[in-house]
Amino acid sequence: SAVISQKPSRDICQRGTSLTIQCQVDSQVTMMFWYRQQPGQSLTLIATANQGSEATYESGFVIDKFPISRPNLTFSTLTVSNMSPEDSSIYLCSVEGVGTSHYEQYFGPGTRLTVT
Amino acid sequence: GESVGLHLPTLSVQEGDNSIINCAYSNSASDYFIWYKQESGKGPQFIIDIRSNMDKRQGQRVTVLLNKTVKHLSLQIAATQPGDSAVYFCAESSQGGKLIFGQGTELSVKP
């Protein structure tokens, strides 16, 4: 499986500010995803980060709030814009297709965001 | 809409016993299922997967069973150890890509 790192690992931010989260993979991957995990909850897909084109957002998530970049096959960023306390969550990136079976998804360690 | 849910939010077992974690899914078109383990402060860790053309798959101390008739998925952990304590998520997808996650079951192993 791929080694996935995220920066920062955690942060405490003031409302109204923005935070950019980085995801780095140690090998080239086709598919990268961003998820949100609210406290005590399951994972919800925010968007698919497409290399060379705009991200594909899931229902309830918009580009203005969660802009995503994917400049190459090993790196992506997610920005949480104009934050409010409701944005306090763990944000996770994942990659697909690195394992022996197609469709396997592997996750980074997550970024724990607290908005005050 | 599509959903994947779990029957039991918490499960407590004695060390050495077998654990069974259940999951129900609602999308009959789902063709791929994964179990993840998430320890506190970490990202989900891939455990085992199964495709819809199979009804059973075994790994090291883990077995996944798929019953497409009733749209039910289970994860069996043999000889449960304290290190197995975590939250377990099932997830499903159709034709690859987007994963839909269940709500999670917290497994607690008593020594």
Image (cartoon, rainbow, N blue to C red):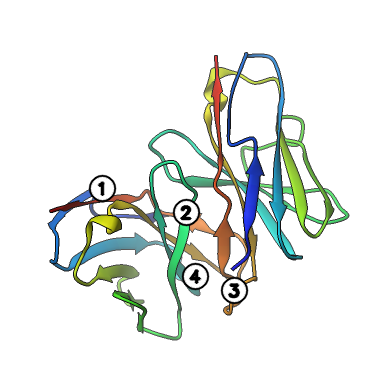
Residue B9 is marked as 1
The chain ID associated with circle 3 is: A
Q: Amino acid at mark 4?
A: Ser
Q: Amino acid at mark 2?
A: Pro
Residue at 63%, 14% in the rendered image: A15
Instruction: State which chain disc 1 sits on.
Output: B
Mark 2 Cα shell of 10 Å, populated few (<14), some (14-19), many (≥20): many
Q: In the image, which is nearer the foreground, mark 3 or mark 4?
A: 3
Q: Quadrant of the N terminus of chain A?
A: bottom right
B97 relative to B103, above or below:
below
How many residues crowd around disc 3 within 10 Å: few (fewer than 14), some, or many (20 or more)? few
Which of the two marks, 1 or 4, is nearer to us in this view? 1
Query: Are the residues at dot 2 and dot 3 in contact (C-beta closer than 8 Å)?
Result: no
> Element type at marker 4?
loop
Which residue is label 2 attached to? B44
Of labels 2 and 1, earlier in sequence is 1
Q: How many angstroms separate mark 2 from mark 3 (CA)? A: 15 Å
Image quarter in which the C terminus of chain A is found: top right
- Give, as a three-letter code, the residue at label 3: Gly
Residue holding disc 3: A99
Vertical placement of residue B59 versus B43, above or below: below
**In this rendering, is residue A37 above or below A73?**
above
From the viewer's perspective, tell me whether residue B9 is left or right of residue B13.
right
- Residue in the picture at 22% in, 72% down: B78
Residue A26: x and y in percent read: 71, 60
CA–CA distance in space, label 2 to label 4: 21 Å
